[in-house]
C-alpha cells in the first residue's frame, strides 16, 4: 500500500533527477550525446551532405530527451502537489476523520 510519505518521496526524487539531468544536459550536452552514441553506434556523427552532425541518426536526441525530462518533471510536480490524496496513512482507516461536526462513534454529521 502506498503511503502519502512514499508518494511525496517519489515525487521529490523525480523532480531532483529530471532537474539535475536538465542542468547537465543544458551545460554540457553529455546526456543526449551519450544516448545518441548508444543508439546509433558507428553511424553517430557521420558526414551527411558534407556536414558532420547527428543527422546521420535521423533525429535530434536532445529534443526527445528534453520532452522526456519535462514530462518526468511535470509528473513529479503533480504527485508532489496532489499526491497526498492518493496515499493512505497507516494508522487511519478508510472514511472521514471525526471532527467537531462528526459524532465519534457513528461518524455521522451532528446537527
Image: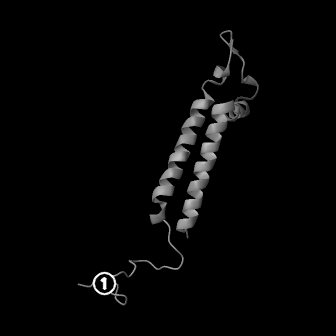
Residue in front for this viewpoint, 52 or 96: 96
Instruction: Report which quarter residue 6 is drawn in.
Output: bottom right
Residue in front for this viewpoint, 111 or 62: 111
Residue 95 location (% of width, % of height): 40, 77
Seen at 66% across and 22% down, the residue is: 54
**Residue 47 in the image: above or below residue 21:** above
Query: Relative to 79, is 57 on the left or the right?
Result: right
- Please identify the residue farthest to the bottom as the structure is shown: 105
Seen at 61% across and 23% down, the residue is: 58
Seen at 57% across and 36% down, the residue is: 66
Residue that badge 1 annotates: 108
Instruction: Report which quarter residue 9 is drawn in.
Output: bottom right
Query: Relative to 12, is 48 on the left or the right?
Result: right
Residue 83 location (% of width, % of height): 48, 60
Seen at 65% across and 10% down, the residue is: 49
Q: Residues within 10 Å of mark 1 (few under 14, many from 20)?
A: few
**Residue 93 in the image: above or below residue 37:** below
Q: Can you say which quadrant of the picture contains the C terminus?
A: bottom left
Amino acid at each position: 500500500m502506498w503511503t502519502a510519505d512514499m508518494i511525496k518521496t517519489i515525487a521529490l526524487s523525480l523532480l531532483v533527477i529530471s532537474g539535475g539531468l536538465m542542468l547537465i544536459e543544458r551545460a554540457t550536452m553529455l546526456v543526449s550525446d551519450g544516448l545518441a552514441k548508444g543508439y546509433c553506434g558507428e553511424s553517430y556523427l557521420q558526414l551527411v551532405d558534407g556536414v558532420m552532425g547527428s543527422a546521420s541518426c535521423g533525429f535530434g536526441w536532445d529534443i526527445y530527451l528534453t520532452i522526456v525530462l519535462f514530462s518526468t518533471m511535470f509528473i513529479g510536480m503533480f504527485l508532489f502537489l496532489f499526491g497526498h490524496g492518493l496515499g493512505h496513512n497507516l494508522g487511519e482507516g478508510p472514511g472521514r476523520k471525526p471532527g467537531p461536526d462528526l459524532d465519534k462513534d457513528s461518524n455521522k454529521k451532528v446537527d
